């Protein structure tokens, strides 16, 4: 059975098309990372899957039901936005309150222990640090022992150790058979957790592939050199830029072949430097290339 089924969904906000004919199926036990730049439509997609919003056209099913039905939502865990935590309620009270909506909630003490929040149980949520709030938000997604969780930017703003701790909790949930759909700006986070990656941009799914498949697609190298001839249009150069200082920056999937071609063509160059494009650059490259393709369609 498909756990999450998004079928031909379009959602507008006035003139803005936040999602444009999006189709996405997530199977049981999958851990899917939804990746995209600001404003891509990730949060809108999660809000449709969680039943907080309705699509204009198309359909969304979760665990075979309508996500707007209370019965369906008991199988679904979501992280509230930071502003969604009532600031005057104590941490333990918030967990009890959310857990009270589920038939078999996790014991509050065990959950707080798992997320390193035991000593905060009696603190008002308004007094928590940003990192502690994020941990509480993810804990709340798990309190009802849901079959599927939706995590929107689970570790944004966290330091390295807090991020690792949360990744551990997400991995444990997944290892026990849970299905996860998470959004992130961080390729690093998606790389650490997800088996499958969906890249979304301008409301359109640009890529949907295994993590390895996506990494292969973004396996660009950056070649920096100084040359009098313009090399930015050479075959094999995905994108290139000539700088005022005489250097040229060339992105290619095969830097060895590019350098061999330059040598055999007798091109004069100096100050050669080659490094892997950062994941961020590679992701930007993929989104830019697909946008260009879209414009030519
Ligand atoms: N309530 C709203 N009213 C008007 N426009 C909205 C609303 N929510 C989202 N949008 C617009 O829809 C588009 C998609 O936004 P969305 O928040 O889904 O993107 P996102 O990928 O989650 O971005 P971010 O990474 O910045 O959180 C954006 O252009 C945004 O401005």
Image (tube, rainbow, N blue to C red):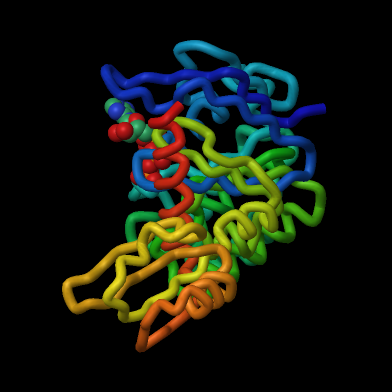
Which residue is at 27% across, 19% downward? 15
Which residue is at 35% across, 39% downward? 39
Which residue is at 38% across, 57% downward? 233
Q: Quadrant of the N terminus?
A: top right
Vertical side of 40 occupied by 218: above or below: below
Picture quadrant where residue 224 is located = bottom left
Vertical side of 132 occupied by 247: above or below: below
How far across and how far down the image is residue 132, in percent? 45, 63
How far across and how far down the image is residue 243, in percent? 22, 70
In the rendered image, the residue lying farthest to the left is 244
Judging depth in this view, the residue of 53 and 84 nearest the camera is: 53
Judging depth in this view, the residue of 251 and 278 nearest the camera is: 251
Taking the image in four quarters, ligand 1 sits in the one at top left
Vertical side of 53 occupied by 210: above or below: below
Which residue is at 58% across, 71% downward? 257
How far across and how far down the image is residue 207, in percent? 58, 41
Judging depth in this view, the residue of 48 and 146 nearest the camera is: 48
One can see residue 217 in this view: yes
Picture quadrant where residue 12 is located = top left
One can see residue 132 in this view: no
How far across and how far down the image is residue 22, in percent? 54, 25
Q: In the displayed structure, does residue 242 sit left or right of residue 288? A: left
Q: In the displayed structure, does residue 155 sit left or right of residue 208? A: left
In the rendered image, the residue lying farthest to the bottom is 271
């Amino acid at each position: 059975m498909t756990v999450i089924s998004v079928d031909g969904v379009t959602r507008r906000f006035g003139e803005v098309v936040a999602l444009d004919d999006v189709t996405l199926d997530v199977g049981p036990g999958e851990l899917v990372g939804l990746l995209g730049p600001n404003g891509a439509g990730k949060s809108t997609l999660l809000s449709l899957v969680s039943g907080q919003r309705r699509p204009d056209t198309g359909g969304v099913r979760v665990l075979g039901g309508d996500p707007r039905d209370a019965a369906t939502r008991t199988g679904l865990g979501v992280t509230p936005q930071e502003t969604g935590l009532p600031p005057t309620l104590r941490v333990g009270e918030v967990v009890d309150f959310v857990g009270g909506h589920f038939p078999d909630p996790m014991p509050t003490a065990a959950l707080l222990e798992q997320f390193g929040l035991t000593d905060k149980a009696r603190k008002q949520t308004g007094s928590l640090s940003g990192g502690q709030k994020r941990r509480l938000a993810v804990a709340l997604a798990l309190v009802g022992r849901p079959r599927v969780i939706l995590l929107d930017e689970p570790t944004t703003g966290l330091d390295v150790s807090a991020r690792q701790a949360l990744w551990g909790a997400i991995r444990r949930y997944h290892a026990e058979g849970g299905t996860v759909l998470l959004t992130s700006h961080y390729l690093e986070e998606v790389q650490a957790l997800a088996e499958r990656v969906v890249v979304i941009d301008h409301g359109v799914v640009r890529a949907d592939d295994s993590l390895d498949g996506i990494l292969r697609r973004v396996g660009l190298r950056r070649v920096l050199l100084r040359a009098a001839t313009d090399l930015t249009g050479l075959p094999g150069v995905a994108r290139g830029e000539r700088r005022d200082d005489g250097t040229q920056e060339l992105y290619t999937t095969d830097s060895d072949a590019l350098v061999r071609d330059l040598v055999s063509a007798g091109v004069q160059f100096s100050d050669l430097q080659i490094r892997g494009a950062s994941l961020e650059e590679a992701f930007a490259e993929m989104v830019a290339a697909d946008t260009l393709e879209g414009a030519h369609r």
